[in-house]
Image (cartoon, helix red, strand yellow):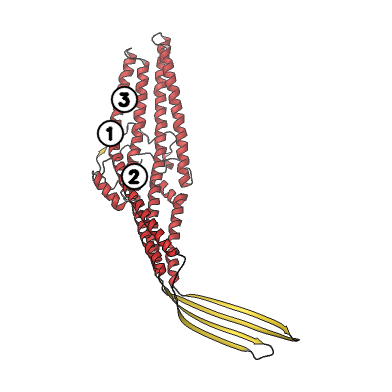
Amino acid sequence: MKRFCLRTVLTASLCVAGLPGIDQAKASDLWEIYELALANDPGFQAEVLAHEAAELNRPLDQSVFRPAVTSNAELGRQRSDATGTNRTSDDNQLSVQASLSIYDRPGRIKIAQTEIRIRASEYMLANARHDLMLRVAERYFNILAAQDAREVARLEKIAIRRQMDLADERLEVGLGTQTDFFDAKARFKQAEANEIQAQNLINSHVAALKEMIGVTPEALSPLGADAPLVLPVPDDIHAWVDKALAQNVPLRVQSLNSEIALIEMDRQKSMTRPTVSLGAEYRWQDSNVMSASPDDSTTTSVGLTVRYPLYHGGGIQLLTRQAGVLYNRENRLLEQARRLASSQTTSAFLDVTSSVSQVEALFEAIAAGESALEAKEEGFRAGLTTNLDVLDAQRDLSISRTNYLRARYNYILSVLHLERSAGQLDEEDIRRVNSWLD
């Protein structure tokens, strides 16, 4: 990962690159899945459209200070009957009005708010992209972990089957007991159940990934045996927390929301100020009575209109007070966002450092488990250990293998979560992780 130095490289004891059912020629890697998610994930696309809509508020608010032109036309005819005399009159009018706002402080403040809202929308879109990256990585590695669990169960079945056959042979020659055979058979059935459960998990995780990308991936590229295992740089939890307090994306969004609420207080107060607009009108009128001379006239007027709010039932004062309450609320949420960013970064940092130690310990556990299994198998053939001892050793080895492979994925996800909490997650991180796949 960026800002991470390469250190020890571990070699997996279980080769997952050639898992049954994986066609490597058609396998999709993490970057390909991420690109599909960018184009097809409904949640992310909704955020893209939300940002586009937010950007349209800029010209929308600015249009208030551009000229506005309206026109009206009226065609009328009136007929009257008085004292035996019929009269018909026409009244036709055409008018064009133009207006231009000259001074409108609330409108100007609203434009300033809109600019901040657009910046907040940009951060929200970035946060949605970060969320997409993590969801893709989590669902991708969930599938690989389930495939690993299925392969471990398959290998365990093979080993237990061999042990069950050996127990059966010893029973036939009078060297074993039925208990040994039934113990092996019970473990064999449990391994079968584990394999079925792993397959169900694969199907479930594939469906979850399909929800994002819109198609079912034929196969996924597995994590390579030489994927790096490194500590954060700097290896200082306080430095990462400081980064988060300065760059965490949700914290930045909440900071902008607090700024918007502060400006809203000023906007509500400015509602008591006058507004000034320039207006012009051209009016043509044709009014006549059939028995009289036509009356055709035009009128042109230009003037300033000043509107000053005198009293609105105390509504402006109440809105100003409400804006102050909402500003205090946004400040509380800002403090909550700071604490959450600090907490999440601390947790992610500890997850990364503990994952490094956990993977190394589990790697050693596999080596020790293989040695223990080999010794107990030799002891069983020599009559020094029981069949149950061998089965227990096989079970412990399978658990260590499964935990080791899962821990490698958890390490990668912890690194991505740390980058996100510190506001540094980007597509380069996805490309780097992708380079660790076979």
Q: Residue at x 61, y 78 (%)?
A: 74
- Rendering coords of residue 403 (x, y %): 35, 32
Quadrant in the picture for the C terminus? top left
Looking at numbered disc 1 in the image, what kind of residue is underneath it?
Glu
Q: Between disc 3 and disc 1, whose residue precedes? A: 1
Helix, strand, or loop for circle 1? helix
Q: Which residue is mark 3?
A: 370
Q: Which residue is mark 1?
A: 360
Asked if residue 95 lies left or right of residue 367, the reply is right
Q: Between disc 1 and disc 2, whose residue precedes? A: 1
The disc label shown at residue 102, or none: none
Q: Between disc 2 and disc 3, whose residue precedes? A: 3
Q: Which residue is mark 2?
A: 417
Q: Tell me whether circle 3 and circle 1 mark residues in contact (CB < 8 Å).
A: no
Helix, strand, or loop for circle 3? helix
Report the front residue among 336 and 70. Answer: 336
